[in-house]
Image (tube, rainbow, N blue to C red):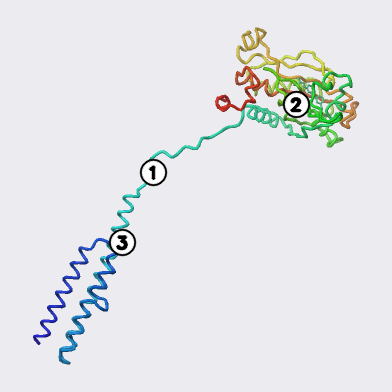
Amino acid sequence: MERVIYLKSKILQIKEEALRELRELDKPEALQELKVKFLGKKGSLTALLRQMGSLSPEERPIMGQIVNEVRTRLEEAWEERSTELEELALKKRLATERIDITLPGTRVPRGHFHPLTQVIEEIEDIFLGMGFQIAEGPEIESDYYNFEALNLPKEHPAREMQDSFYITEEILLRTQTSPVQIRTMEKLHPNLPVKIIAPGKVYRNDDDATHSPMFHQVEGLVVDHGIRMSDLKGILLNFSRQMFGESREIRLRPSFFPFTEPSAEVDVSCMLCGGAGCRLCKGTGWIEILGSGMVHPKVLEMGGYNPKEVTGFAFGIGIERIAMLKFGIEDMRLLFDNDLRFLQQF
Ligand code: 2NL
């Protein structure tokens, strides 16, 4: 019995030692090492079990029970400490890897559309609102669509080799977007109405502060039964007021284009002085914004329509001019330099 008491005190001593070491341990990696030291095959508890051979058959179960209780207690304590250490490690990580979500992020610089694109889209929106459709076509055109179908005589100065960009004698870069409108009439006739705008790039051999060899135009065309000059004026007045302000007025001045008869230049009352006269309108109170007219009978015919049955009006707007007016730009070439310091202003 003395031997039992001795072994029991030894076991409890090992138990206390193990629990203390477990409490003092602060690295999860050391846990396994500790388990081996006390509970493993060569551990101190196992070593004690071996000494049980010297006990009597009555003593053995008592000792076995004690050893098992201690073993279970130690395994439990080991599990508890293990969870505790994992939680501690997680807390530490959460504290050191903490993200301050109130810090401002890295701002991504945001671009915007080129001023010319802004103006084109604004014009498109206004005409879409009046029931127009948008038509597009090739920038490389035939002499037929660019000049012949528009009633430009062979000797017209625009047809001179030095004024347009010819690719061959018959093919050139379009000098206005009218060929798109001829193509649309060809496609649509005899259906009515034709009510389109044709925005896009056009090309002429000019290059100075007020001319660029590539520039932009929006042309418009309406063909139907009984279209009159008052329809032209109403549409363009509505456009001018949406584009330049509610209180704008327009005036039509007689002009000439080979593809319209009669033809008219359209002026809008100055958006800067309201018509009183200022630097922008050069004291006149009016600013020229586009050319227009009633579609020439020969042009209607070229498009497949009978000029005895239908009439139409057309107009052409230079986009660069409108953008320069709107944004107060003095030199057209600035629009094409692609200098961000300039473009970012608009
Ligand atoms: C201007 C003048 C204009 C047209 C363009 C046109 C098109 C067809 C038939 C008749 Cl298919 N006319 N276009 C008409 C009048 C003027 O442009 O000064 N543009 C900047």
Which amino acid type is shown beneath numbered disc 2?
Tyr
Q: Which mark is residue 203?
A: 2
Q: Which mark is residue 86?
A: 3
Q: Which one is in front, 217 or 15?
A: 15
Q: Is residue 241 left or right of residue 306?
A: left
Which residue carries the number 1 mark? Answer: 101
Quadrant housing the N terminus: bottom left
Q: Assess disc 1: are there few (<14), some (14-19) or many (≥20) residues with their C-alpha within 10 Å of its C-alpha.
A: few
Which amino acid type is shown beneath numbered disc 1?
Ile
Which amino acid type is shown beneath numbered disc 3?
Glu
Q: Secondary structure at mark 1?
A: loop
Q: Assess disc 3: are there few (<14), some (14-19) or many (≥20) residues with their C-alpha within 10 Å of its C-alpha.
A: few
Nearer the viewer's eye, disc 2 or disc 3?
Answer: 2
* Circle nearer the N terminus (1, 2): 1
Q: CA distance from mark 3 to mark 1?
A: 26 Å
Rendering quarter of residue 339? top right
Residue 325's place in the image compared with 5, above or below, is above
Q: Position of residue 218 (x, y in %)?
A: 73, 27
Quadrant housing the C terminus: top right
